[in-house]
């Protein structure tokens, strides 16, 4: 697609429920990232996928968070047993795989705003 | 550990005024990249500029200019002759050269009034 697409744009859920957030990256971008933007913590890295390599999950805040990327394209971020502190905007980004990796320019989606009541 | 500090949380100006956003960073890495991203009300972060730690040449692009000073660990950003469309939150970010995790500053909200 022309840009990074995220769905849903808004999700309101009750504490304890599971949620799934979807990210459709730019076609041809092999690197995919999830970040979380919250009032208290700013922008935080969650997870990074690159091709068929094992993902870098070092930013996931707890074992209630997981993500997968199927077929090297679409990614789903799953939050189990949601808590109020999970309320945030979840941003997905993708990039071409360049070297060095730090030089990659990320294209972000508009985010999924999650509100846990 | 890496850290990015944007001391200004919000700046309000009248259209056509210049705006300078401060960014100070900390890193132990010798090679790294610095970025500025803009987040308009629509929510998505938009890439503005990238600098590597070996390139201290300052740049002007249209109404935007950047001042990278490695000696003071600063990477400041200036909007000349601001316009209402420049109203957004601006983020400075740092990443080590071989890394995949951006460390963001807290952001500076710029409000340009007509």
Image (tube, coloured by chain):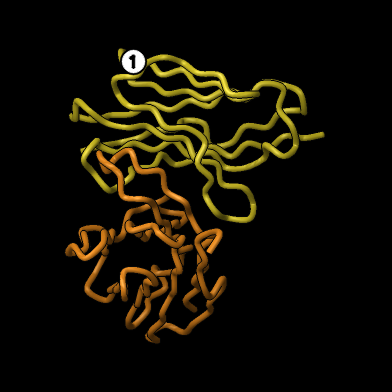
Chain colours: A orange, B yellow
Q: Quadrant of residue B96?
A: top left
Which residue is outermost to the front?
A28
Q: Position of residue A99 (x, y in %)?
A: 26, 40
SS assignment at label 1: helix
Location of residue B103 by image quarter: top left
| Corner quadrant of residue B53 | top left
Q: Chain of mark 1?
A: B
* Foreground residue among A25 and B33: A25
Q: Position of residue B46 (x, y in %)?
A: 53, 45
Query: In the image, what residue occupies the spot 53% across and 27% down?
Result: B21
Q: Using the image, determine if residue A85 lies above or below residue B107.
A: below
Residue ID at (26%, 59%): A50
What residue is drawn where x is 50% and y is 41%? B47
Quadrant of the drawing holding the N terminus of chain B:
top left
Q: Position of B30 compared to B19: left or right?
A: left
**Which corner quadrant holds the C terminus of chain B?**
top right
As drawn, A98 above or below A68: above
Left or right of residue A83: residue B36: right
Is residue B112 rendered to the left or right of residue A82? right
**Which residue is identified by label 1?**
B72
Q: Position of residue B89 (x, y in %)?
A: 57, 42
Identify the residue at image location x=74%, y=32%. B83
User: Depth check: B61 or A72 in front?
Assistant: A72
């Amino acid at each position: 697609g022309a840009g990074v697409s995220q769905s849903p744009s808004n999700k309101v859920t009750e504490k304890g429920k599971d949620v799934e957030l979807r990210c459709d990256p730019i076609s041809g971008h092999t690197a995919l990232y999830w970040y979380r933007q919250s009032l208290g913590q700013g922008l935080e890295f969650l997870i990074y996928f690159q091709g068929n390599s094992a993902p870098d999950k070092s930013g996931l805040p707890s074992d209630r968070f997981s993500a997968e990327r199927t077929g090297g394209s679409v990614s789903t971020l799953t939050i189990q047993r949601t808590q109020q502190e999970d309320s945030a905007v979840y941003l997905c980004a993708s990039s071409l795989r360049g070297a060095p990796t730090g030089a990659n320019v990320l294209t972000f989606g508009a985010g999924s705003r999650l509100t846990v009541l | 550990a890496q850290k990015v500090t944007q001391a200004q949380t919000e700046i309000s100006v009248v259209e056509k005024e210049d705006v300078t956003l401060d960014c100070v960073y900390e890193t132990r890495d010798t090679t790294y990249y610095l970025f500025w991203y803009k987040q308009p009300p629509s929510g998505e972060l938009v890439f503005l500029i990238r600098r590597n730690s070996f390139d201290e040449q300052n740049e002007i692009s249209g109404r935007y200019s950047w001042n990278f000073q490695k000696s003071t660990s600063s990477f400041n950003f200036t909007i000349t002759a601001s316009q209402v469309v420049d109203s957004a939150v601006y983020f400075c970010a740092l990443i080590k050269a071989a890394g995949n995790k951006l460390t963001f500053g807290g952001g500076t909200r710029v409000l340009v009034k007509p």
